[in-house]
Image (spheres, rainbow, N blue to C red):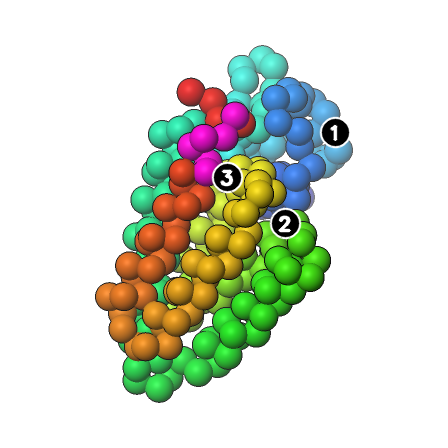
Amino acid sequence: MQSRKSLQDKAYEYLKAQIMDGAFEKGKIYSLAAITASLNMSRTPVRDALLSLSQENLVDVLPSRGFQLHEVTRREIIELYQLRCAIEGYCAAFLASCYAADSSRSEIAMLDKNLKLQEKAVYDHQSADEYYILDMEFHNIIISSTKNKHFYHIIKNNRVRSSDFSLVSLRKEGVIERTLKEHKAIYEALCTGDPVLSQEKMILHLDTPLQNNLSSKLLSD
């Protein structure tokens, strides 16, 4: 028989994957009984998994009712921005320092390739959805350059909380063009090997989605 801990982990991983894949609808209440039945588990490991997800602000547990996706507030958007500035600003500075030491050529080459694909998404395909994937890849390359798995997981876990806002923002007229321009500015700063300039360009860039997200009608107070 599987232990309660392993069952809880299984339920947690399943539910988190479903959340990140967009399987749950915002505003809809899901019953604990339905989830336990689909997983063929008892209530306890599923309930504990949901409590863990609620601590990550991914779901809101509703006593005697079930759970629903967590509604992101303005305060949380600002906190996520501050988190990204701290982590991604550092990562940009780190990558620039490595470039200056001639030890980050592969990441720079990957960014160059990514930017060319971004240009196609913007000017040839005019696809915000395609650009959204490339946007995440661009940032992931910079984050992964540090080889710090905690950075990557923190950003990934928090990115899902604002994914709806990010995609809606990118679909607004002129946003993907401006974002591409900012990405190029970050790339150029990285290629100078200047960590301070690279960090500044990254933080300046992250302010754009912050302002777009704060003006979104999807936010709750």
Q: CA distance from mark 2 to mark 3?
A: 16 Å
For disc 1, the neighbor class at 10 Å (few under 14, some 14 to 19, many from 20) is few
Residues shaded magenta: 212-217
In the picture provided, is 36 more to the left or to the right than 155? right
Under mark 3, the amino acid is: Ser
Under mark 1, the amino acid is: Ala
Q: Residue at x 53, y 37 (%)?
A: 165
Residue 113 vertical placement versus 51 (above, below): below
Q: Which residue, given by chain and number where applicable, does mark 2 sit on?
A: 128
- Which residue, as the protein is rendered here, is positioned at the far bottom? 102
Q: Which quarter shows the C terminus?
A: top left
Q: Residue at x 47, y 76 (%)?
A: 107
Residue 99 place in picture, x, y as percent: 35, 80
Residue 183 place in picture, x, y as percent: 45, 61
Pick the front one: 1 or 152: 152
Question: Which comes sooner in the sequence, label 1 or label 2?
Answer: 1
Which circle, 2 or 3, is nearer the viewer?
2
Q: Which residue, given by chain and number where applicable, does mark 1 sit on?
A: 37
Q: CA distance from mark 1 to mark 2?
A: 38 Å
Q: Is residue 93 magenta?
A: no
Under mark 2, the amino acid is: Ala
Residue 51 place in picture, x, y as percent: 49, 30
Question: Which comes sooner in the sequence, label 2 or label 3?
Answer: 2
Q: Which mark is residue 162?
A: 3
